[in-house]
Image (cartoon, rainbow, N blue to C red):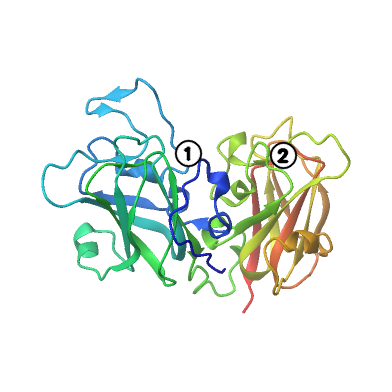
Amino acid sequence: MSKQFIDSPIRIAAPAALPDWATRAVDLASPRIGARALHATDDFFGEVSRMLDPRPARFVPGKYDDNGKWMDGWETRRKRSCGHDWCLIRLGRKGVIFGFDVDTAHFTGNFAPAVSIDATVSEHDEVDALLAAEWHEVLPATTLQGDSHHLLCSTSDQPWTHLRLHIYPDGGIARLRVYGQPAGVFDGVGDRLVDLAALDNGGRALAWNDAHFGAPANLILPGRGTDMGDGWETRRRREPGNDWCILALGAAGTIERITVDTAHFKGNYPDRCSLQAARVVGGTDPSLVTQSMFWPLLLPEQKLSMDAIHEFDKQIAPLGPVTHVRFNIVPDGGVSRLRLWGRVAR
């Protein structure tokens, strides 16, 4: 994936305006794939773990705790000495970082004035071991504004496991997104069946015709969906045709088993589904939309039922190694998870 470098921070009102390198990447700092905050010099007003919450930051008027106004993010005390605050974060997967979204949503008179980020590779999560590691700057010191998204490119194309986020000198950050691609996920898997489309294996949602009630990226999250909002759901179709989304696999592979889970979708699950697939070489992500209409069938139309796990294997066509799939739902509705079990092409 190519980077699109930005000379200065972009400040936007909503994540929908994210650039291509962010929308076509994995949030390596998401707790849903195992990321977690390990340490902070201070989180008096807001626990550092809140900064990694995959949900958008919210503001609750009139909500206070024992330390003051409750804020949905990481917030430190007003520093009355030399130095600055920082925290340590373990990424959910070792990966190459394309860029960051440093979000100061709802922080106005208390946002961090500046930020920088270092990265390292370590097998340890202990603070002392990490502090002794060799760190490399991947985001130079950058000025922030209040209540804004700051989209900032990484200066490194190496894979990393841990981050050290500095704020100068103190204050709050609502959310940190670390956009990139997992690296080395399939090292050592041999000939085992793996979920080639899983988000934590590098799978990505590339394109879709509708996502009114839920994003296609939810299809490839770990675990079963927690509710209807934790899946891909389209609006009620009032015209001919069907809804679809395109997924990129984490690696080229031969798919041998498919799981379609309609958990929690009862009066709104699709009547049927099918999958098309291809091994794509060249082109761009947007160009796949047209190409995908002509990809061969991997799984012919199959009947679905509400709130159930559907397994398919004998119905799968022998297409060999593929890199992308088009998931068709007929005519519309919601699906919680899609698993594409296969063997990595060598």
Q: Is residue 217 visible?
A: yes
| Residue bearing the label numbered 2 | 234
Residue 316 visible in image: no
Q: Is residue 180 above or below residue 38?
A: below
Residue drawn where x is 38% and y is 22% of the image: 61
Q: What amino acid is at disc 1?
A: Pro
| Residue 345 horizontal/vertical position (percent) | 64, 75
- Horizontal side of 36 relative to 266 (left or right) equals left
- Residue extending farthest to the left is 81
Q: Quadrant of residue 57?
A: top left
Residue type marked 2: Thr
Q: Secondary structure at mark 2?
A: loop
Residue drawn at the location 24% of the way across and 58% of the way down: 126
Q: Residue furthest top?
A: 62
Q: Which residue is mark 1?
A: 56
- Residue 62 x, y percent position in the rendering: 35, 20
Local secondary structure at mark 1? loop
Label 1 to label 2: alpha-carbon separation: 21 Å
**Would residue 45 be found to the left or right of residue 51 on screen?**
left
